[in-house]
Image (tube, rainbow, N blue to C red):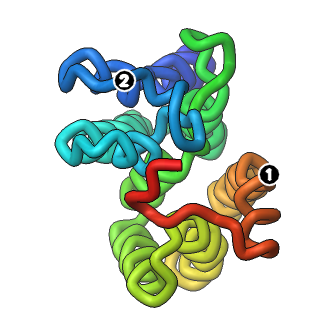
Amino acid sequence: MATTFIIFSYLIGSIPFGLIGKFIFKIKDPRTFGSKNIGATNILRSGNKGAALFTLIFDMLKGLIIILAGKSLELDSLHFVVIAVVLGHIFPIYLLFKGGKGVATFFGVLIGLNLLCGVLTLFSWLLIFLCFKKSSLSALLSIILSNCFLFFLYDNLQQQIAVMIVTIVILFKHKSNIMRLINKEELSIGNPD
């Protein structure tokens, strides 16, 4: 049961809602413009806010629903589910393991694990974004802060470690963004380049 659900979590995480939104909203393939990423931030660069919102909501929901389902089944291996669903988004089998950067799905996972932690993380993203207008910076700092929130608000060491592992993977996926931030070359939301 546990192994099957972990595999199922990966497969659900792999669903590329950014590309599904491309067909629904009739926009260009997000892998051909901007950062060439299938995430909501890059899709927003298409100028279609509906497609970006669709991607954001459903990428979050796949993380949230999987965690809530795992909790309802009282899985002892929920920490592996945390890792599987986010890695599914980042390395989706349906797209030859070339997916998004995992931020929205990570946020959904956090909300599923601990609502207060998830809300604080989203609030920190918004606050940082309002100050700096950089989606990548907001994502990186809020995800790092989420580990602090979990440490104080959520008493499960295995799942805290799982979130830490996923955080490291997401930071690694943002290495080009980190370099651009250091060089003051990072794109703002809405920038088409």
Q: Which amino acid lies under the numbered mark 1 shown in the image of this protein?
A: Phe
Would residue 173 appear left or right of 95 to someone viewing this image?
Answer: right
Residue nearer the viewer, 143 or 85:
143
Residue nearer the viewer, 103 or 130:
130
Q: Which amino acid lies under the numbered mark 2 shown in the image of this protein?
A: Lys
Looking at the image, which residue is at 46% across and 29% down?
Answer: 30
Q: Quadrant of residue 127?
A: bottom left
The circle drawn on residue 172 is: 1
The circle drawn on residue 28 is: 2
Looking at the image, which residue is at 41% across and 66% down?
Answer: 114
Query: Where in the figure is residue 56, as x and y percent of width and height?
Result: 33, 46
Kindly state the secondary structure of the residue where label 2 is placed. Answer: loop
Camera-side mark, 2 or 1:
2
Dot 2 and dot 1 residues touching (CB under 8 Å) = no
Would residue 76 appear left or right of 55 to someone viewing this image?
Answer: right
Is residue 51 visible in the rendered structure shown here? yes
The circle drawn on residue 72 is: none
